[in-house]
């Protein structure tokens, strides 16, 4: 199982480049960021590429509604050229609550849109002229004009539901899970690999990756409270609320919602969620605590690529990232990278 680091885009570019060098020196496979309302994630990958030599550079995820297929193909190919083939592109359908108000996008038929985008990108990177007039997306008479042709982009499909997992297994380089405990990873990985086999692919060629939240701070209770705060924020989104319920965490989430409504702070949310939910959805501790048991549970569940998404503890995100890297780099030294 490979280990990587995930950080927020909400840090200055010069700091991002410094952290990318730090993550590379520690031996991790890759560094990932998300795209929300801050810095452009693809431009951050370009900045990371300029500051590193071997580190892979990932976006998890680019909402498929915010760029045209042709523009995303151009950006991906440019990043592949600039990085020497180190770019990893995560694609996801995101949430109507942000895509509509922020981007004026109509989030319709997300599964169909994801399938059409993967098909368009595959064709363009193979040197073909686009010819897709789909139910949701369209690209016709466009051809990438980049010589020499960069290496194909490794594309991950963000997936939670069964049909999106099937699509990832049959059409993408890999799938990117989020807020998935080891039990959910095992279930999802089995579905992805079965879909790959049905599609005539080698199931081991489809990478199952997942963000796993990691919070490291001098105060263990503060680290767990920071993790709880993120669980509560995501649990308020309908798709993630249903995702947590499928993992048997519905009662814990309802307790957290009641605590939030009663005015509880992050420490109160942690108490309401309870140890079972916190330990299922991430890892939180001090620099002296040992995360090996948690990491082993994911490896045993069939995860190929664990991306430790850093949860900020306190007011200093850089210190939180350094603490997480320092706590996990022992595993890269032991051969997991």
Image (spheres, grey):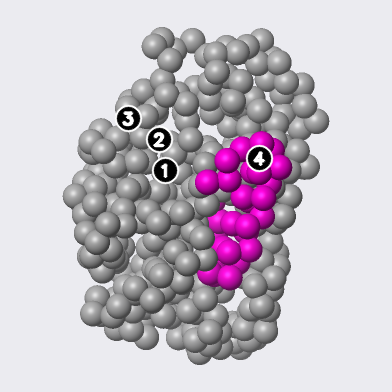
Read off the residue under disc 2.
87
Secondary structure of residue under mark 3: helix
Task: Tell me the residue that label 1 is attached to.
Answer: 58
Q: Please, is residue 95 above or below residue 76 in the view?
A: below
Residue 293 vs residue 57, the one in the foreground = 293
> Is disc 4 placed on a helix, strand or loop?
helix
Image quarter of the N terminus: bottom left
CA–CA distance between discs 2 and 4? Answer: 21 Å
Left-right relation of 254 to 10: right
**First in sequence: mark 2 vs mark 1:** 1
At label 1, counting other C-alpha atoms closer than 10 Å, the crowd grade (few under 14, some 14-19, many 20 or more) is many
Label placed on residue 83: 3
Measure the C-alpha gap from mark 1 to mark 4: 21 Å
In the image, is residue 201 part of the stretch drawn in magenta?
yes
Q: Earlier in the sequence, mark 2 or mark 4?
A: 2
Residue at the outermost right position: 135
């Amino acid at each position: 199982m490979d280990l990587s680091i995930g950080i927020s885009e909400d840090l200055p570019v010069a700091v991002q480049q410094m952290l990318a060098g730090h993550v590379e020196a520690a031996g991790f496979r890759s560094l990932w960021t998300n795209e929300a309302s801050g810095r452009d994630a693809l431009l951050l990958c370009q900045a990371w590429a300029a500051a590193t030599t071997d580190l892979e550079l990932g976006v998890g995820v680019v909402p498929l509604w915010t760029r045209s297929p042709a523009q995303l193909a151009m950006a991906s190919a440019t990043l592949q050229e600039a990085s020497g083939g180190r770019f990893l592109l995560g694609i996801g359908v995101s949430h109507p609550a942000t895509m509509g108000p922020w981007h004026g996008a109509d989030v319709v038929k997300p599964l169909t849109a994801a399938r059409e985008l993967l098909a368009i990108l595959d064709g363009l990177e193979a040197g073909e002229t686009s010819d897709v007039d789909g139910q949701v997306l369209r690209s016709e008479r466009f051809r990438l004009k980049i010589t020499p042709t960069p290496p194909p982009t490794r594309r991950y499909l963000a997936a939670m539901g069964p049909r999106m997992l099937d699509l990832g297994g049959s059409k993408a380089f890999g799938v990117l899970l989020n807020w998935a405990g080891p039990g959910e990873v095992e279930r999802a990985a089995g579905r992805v690999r079965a879909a790959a086999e049905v599609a005539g692919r080698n199931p081991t060629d489809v990478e199952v990756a997942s963000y796993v939240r990691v919070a490291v701070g001098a105060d263990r209770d503060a680290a767990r409270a920071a993790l709880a705060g993120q669980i509560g924020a995501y649990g308020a989104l309908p798709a993630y609320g249903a995702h947590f319920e499928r993992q048997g965490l519905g009662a814990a989430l309802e307790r957290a919602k009641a605590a939030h409504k009663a005015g509880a702070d992050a420490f109160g949310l942690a108490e309401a969620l309870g140890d079972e939910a916190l330990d299922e959805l991430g890892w939180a501790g001090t620099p002296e605590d040992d995360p090996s048991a948690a990491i082993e549970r994911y490896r045993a569940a069939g995860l190929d690529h664990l991306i430790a998404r850093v949860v900020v503890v306190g007011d200093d995100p850089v210190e939180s990232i350094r603490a997480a890297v320092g706590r996990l780099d022992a595993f890269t030294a032991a051969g997991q990278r």
